[in-house]
Image (spheres, coloured by chain):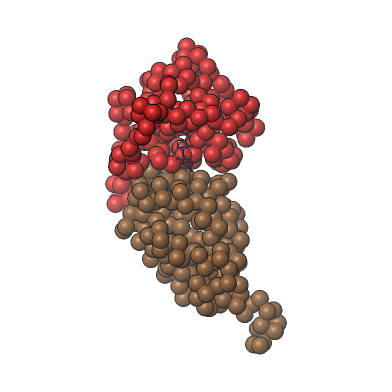
Chain colours: A brown, B red
Amino acid sequence: MSALAKENPMKQFSKHSVSAQAMVDAFKRCGIDYVTTVPDMVQIALHQLLDSGESGLKVVHCTTEDQAIEVAGGLYAGGKNVAVIVQNQGLYAGINSLRALGLDSKVPLLFVIGQFGREFSNLGGNPRDSKRRVVFLLEPLLETLGVPYWRLEGPDDMGNVEAAWKASRERSGPAALIVGHFVGW
Amino acid sequence: MKTLDACKILDAHRDDAIVVCTMGAMNALDKLPLNPLTMACVPLMGGAASIGLGLALARPERKVFVFDGDASLLMELGGLVSISHARPKNLYHFVFNNSIQFAGLGNLETPGARSADLVAMAKACGFEAAQRIDALDDLESRLKGILAGPGPSFVEVVVEYDAPALGTENPAVEMTDERFTRMGDEIRRIRHHLGCDAAVAA
Ligand SMILES: Cc1ncc(C[n+]2csc(CCOP(=O)(O)OP(=O)(O)O)c2C)c(N)n1
């Protein structure tokens, strides 16, 4: 066990985290001005920053993921740039709205999806090898839906925020950024 | 009151409002002259009010009307809370309550048709105003006042329904391709009309 891990065993996983501020900065580089969301456990630090009012991004709090996707569709119709922040369970809950607005209607939508429930032993490994269905189903499901995705597994992957955003604009449809571990404060 | 007659009155008072319609109200608006600021939420049951919320937040300078169905509202009932939480002053949510689903097609009773109080729900969720209108002349006389008041505003419009078209004589109805493409086309038409694409390119 490393000295860091001995001092606080949780800290050994921090290399898999990106900070909330780094995510907000990346959103801003994309030109995103709105977030719609039902909150996700692994992105609590990001939600707290967004809710503080200090991020410069506007947040629409919804009571279902269907609504979060639909509000994003309405904001897009009105000319805004939106990120939809949900967890893996939320993506599963919102599939019909994703199908209608993202796929059939070809509305560019950036999904930021937290991998809730991922066992720490899987960090640094392949989320498809997770023992948890809620985790390992996500990528194959996105493939079935024809939604391209990028993993955010640590600070080295920060460029994937812009890559996913760009893909959503270029293909005019949904694209996903999968947040693999707790966002840092 | 007939849905088409109610839609005619609402359409006459819309000025430069954006309209998001669904279900029976969509079929009615399809019979009126096309307005480039109208979009249908289809096929996406329950989505109209939240799409309207997004539009209302994006375009605070103009009114947004939502023409919803009763069963559609119930499918995303928590959306009333999302709306009141976001407080869009320019959002007017009209629910065409005929107490049935698949109106004019199969006429199946909506759960709660005889017991649920939609206006009380909207009030309890924190809408600025909520009322029930069940006569066409009432709609005509009260609409100006409703639209002069602040949103989010909720209006339950009680409407009749036609006999079901499906049955032994007419056992199936095919969906056209357009039903699956029109929502996106109408979203892009609204963006174009509002000058959004130019703003993005600039
Ligand atoms: C998620 C989902 N479940 C079921 C349906 C099938 N469906 C289509 S229309 C409808 C009823 C709509 O009723 P209402 O909103 O009251 O409109 P009306 O038919 O009265 O105009 C249902 C259940 C659907 N489109 N989507």
Q: Residue at x 50, y 75 (%)?
A: A126
Q: Is residue B16 visible?
A: no
Left or right of A21 in this view: B58: left
Q: Give how far across and how far down residue A67 sits, in percent.
A: 51, 45
Q: Residue at x 58, y 55 (%)?
A: A39
- In the rendered image, the residue lying farthest to the right is A7
Left or right of B151 in this view: B58: left
Q: Is residue B50 visible?
A: yes
Q: Residue at x 58, y 32 (%)?
A: B111
Q: Nearer the viewer, residue B94 or B117?
A: B117
Whether residue B37 is situated above or below residue A9 in the rendered picture: above
Whether residue B91 is situated above or below residue A118 in the rendered picture: above
Q: Nearer the viewer, residue A84 or A56?
A: A84
Left or right of A87 in this view: A110: left
- In the rendered image, the residue lying farthest to the top is B137
Question: Splitting the image into 4 quarters, where does residue B9 fall?
Answer: top left
Count all numbered tags in the image, as a single digit.
0
Q: Give how far across and how far down residue B50 sits, in percent.
A: 49, 40
Q: Give how far across and how far down residue A8 sits, in percent.
A: 69, 79
Q: Give how far across and how far down residue B130 sits, in percent.
A: 58, 26
Question: Splitting the image into 4 quarters, where does residue B153 fall?
Answer: top right
Whether residue A136 is situated above or below residue B83 in the rendered picture: below
Q: Residue at x 51, y 72 (%)?
A: A127
